[in-house]
Image: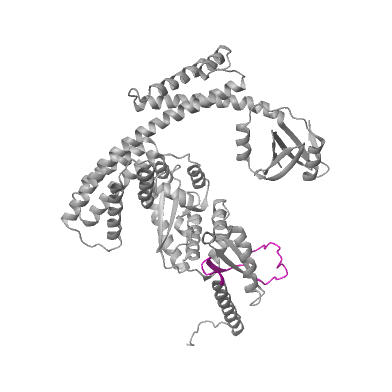
Amino acid sequence: MANETSPQIPEDIKKQFDELKNKLGKIKTALLKEYNDLILGIALLPKQAEKEKTEQKEKKNGIDLLVLIDEAKSKEHPFALKDKMFGVIEKIIHPIDEAIIPTVILKLELIESCYDGKYEILQMISLGAIVYDPNDMLAAIKIAEVHKSMSLKKFDKYIVSYVAAGSLFRGEKSNDIDVYIVVDDTDVKKMSRFELKDKLRAIIINMGIQAKEITGVQKEFHIQVYILTDFWESVKDASPVIFTFLRDGVPLYDRGVFMPWKLLLKMGRIRPSPEAIDMHMDVGEKSIELARHRLLSVVSQDIYYGILNPAQAALMLYGVAPPTPAEAIQLLEEIFVKKEKLLEKKYVDILANIRKFYKDIEHGKVKDISGADVDKMLQDADSYLKRIKKLFNQIQKKSEAKVVDEMYEQCVAVVEDVLKLEKITGSADKGFQELIRKHVLPERLYEIFKSVVKTKKEYGKKAISKQEIEKIRRGASVLIGSLLEYVQRKRGFELQKTKIRFKYGDKFGDIYILDDQAFIINDINAQEKEVAIAKVADGRLTSIKKSSLVELEAAISKQRAPKQFFIAETIFEDLKKLYGKDIKISI
C-alpha cells in the first residue's frame, strides 16, 4: 500500500505568504514605534463582497488592514486623532506595500456601531487574521462572534440580546471574556421557565467550548444566561449586577430589549423602588448573623456583602444609581463624609478594610484567619451597621425635606406659568382661584395645590408620615402633568404662528422663529431629522450651526407668548442660499 502524505503547499503560494508575513512584521514594528500606547489591535480583514468605491478603487487586489485605536489614551479630539493617525499610517504602509490599504477605526466607533445595531465590522474581525492584539480584545471579539453566530443559528427565536461585558470594549488586559445572553421565555408553554433556562444554558455553554476550539482563543470564556422575566425582575429590584450590566455592556446582537433599557438608565428613568432600597438594608443584618457561623471564605464573603449592601442602599436613597463595590467606597466618602458631612471617615475605612480582606482571600493572599480576626471584623461590622442605619434615617429626612421643597417649587412654578399665559396677576393661590372661577381649570386641581402648600408649611413643625408624603407627591404629579399639558397645548397653538413651512425639490422643511433665534428642520419627513440653529438679526439668518430636536424642544418650553414678527425679504434670500432658488413658502 502506497504511503499517504499530506498535501504540500505550492512553493509560489508559500513564497507569497512568507513575503506578506514579512511585510506585516515591518508594518507592525513601524506602527508600534510611532503609536505604541494608542494601538489596540491590528488585523487583516477579508475582502468584502461589494466593496465601496474609494480612492484606492483601482487596486482590485488590495489587502485591507484594520488598525484599532484607543482614543481614550489621547487628549486630542478623537476624530482629529483618527485623521492624523490615518495620514501617518498611510505613509508608513505605502513604501512597504501599496496594495495594503489601512482602515483606521476608533474604539468608540466600534462601540457606537454596536449601539446602532451595525455588526458588520465585528463579523469582519471574526473572519480576519489577527496581527497584533496586546490585550486580546480582537480575540475576544472573534470568539464572541463565533459563539453568537452558533447560538443564533440554533435559537434565533428565543435569543433577544447577546451582550459583551464592558471590560471587553475597554481595551484592558483581563484574564477572561464575559458575555451575557437574554432568552425570551414569555412564550414558553411546554416546560417551566427554569427548565427552559437550564436546557438552553447547557447547550449554549457547550457551544462556547466549541467556539474556543474553533478560534483557538485560550482565555476563559464565561457565558451568563438570563431568562427575560428574571432580567426584568432584576431591573425592578435594582440589582447592582444588572445596573452594571446595562450601564457598561455593549450589545453584539439586540432585538430591541437591551438598548432601550440602557438608554432609560442613562436618562435616569430607571430608579430603585422603596422596596428595593429596603431590601438592600435588610440584607446587611441577615448576612451579619449568618457570618458568625461560617468558615474563612464564607465568613469573609458574608461580612463583606453585609456591609456593602447597606452602603449601596444609602447611596441609592441619596439618588445615586447602584454603584460597583469599588465605586461604593469612593462615593460613600465623597458624598457623606466630605460633601454632606453626615458620616465619619472611620466607617468608610471599615468597609474598605473588609473589602481588601475579602479580595485578599479571593486572590489567595490570605489562606487562614483567626477567631480574633473574625470577632474584630464582626465588631466593626456591627458598629458600622448601627452607624449606617443612623445615616439612612438622616438621608431619609433630608430626602423627604428635599422632595417636599421640590414638589412645592415645581407646583408653584407651573401655576405661575399658567397665570402668565392667562395674563392673571397676584399670588399663585389667588390666581388659581380666579382660574377656577373662569372655568379654565377644574376645582380638583386647586384642592391638590392647597394640600401641597399646606404640607410645605407644616413639614418640620409636626410629624408627617411617609405614606402621607407619598400621597401628596402623587397628587402633585397629577397637578403638574395636567398644567404642563394645558401650557403646552396653548403655547403650541401660539407657536404655530412662528412657524414657516417651505418646500425645496420634493422635500418639506420648517423654520421656527423664536425671538432672536431660529431653528430649521431640513426635512420634516426624515426618520432622523437634521436641525440647525441660527441667529435672527436685522431680518437675516446668521451664525447657522448644527443643533438638535432636544435643543429645539428646550427652547420651545422656555418660549412665552410669541412676539409679532414680520418676515423680511432677506429671510427668503437666506433660505434660497441654503436650499436653492426653487424654494417655495407655504402660506
Quadrant of image for the C terminus: top right
Q: Nearer the viewer, residue 285 or 222?
A: 285
Q: Residue at x 37, y 42 (%)?
A: 315
Q: Looking at the picture, does residue 445 appear above or below residue 8?
A: above
List x then y, in percent, for residue 193.
Answer: 39, 45
Query: Relative to residue 587, is residue 13 drawn left or right?
Result: left
**Is residue 63 among the parts visible in the rendering?**
no
Q: Residue at x 48, y 59 (%)?
A: 170
Which of the 4 quarters of the picture holds residue 459? top left
Q: Nearer the viewer, residue 394 or 553?
A: 394
Which of the 4 quarters of the picture holds residue 503? top right
Magenta residue check for 338: no
Q: Main secondary structure of the magenta part?
A: loop
Q: Nearer the viewer, residue 574 or 235?
A: 574
Q: Nearer the viewer, residue 273 or 128?
A: 273
Residue at the far bottom in the pictured view = 2
Query: Relative to residue 92, is residue 214 drawn left or right?
Result: left
Query: Relative to residue 196, is residue 551 drawn left or right?
Result: right
**Is residue 3 among the parts visible in the rendering?**
yes
List x then y, in percent, for residue 383.
Answer: 23, 44
Which residues, given as a range, are shown in magenta? 34-62
Q: Residue at x 50, y 65 (%)?
A: 138
Q: Looking at the picture, does residue 581 appear above or below residue 149?
A: above
List x then y, in percent, for residue 298.
Answer: 24, 53
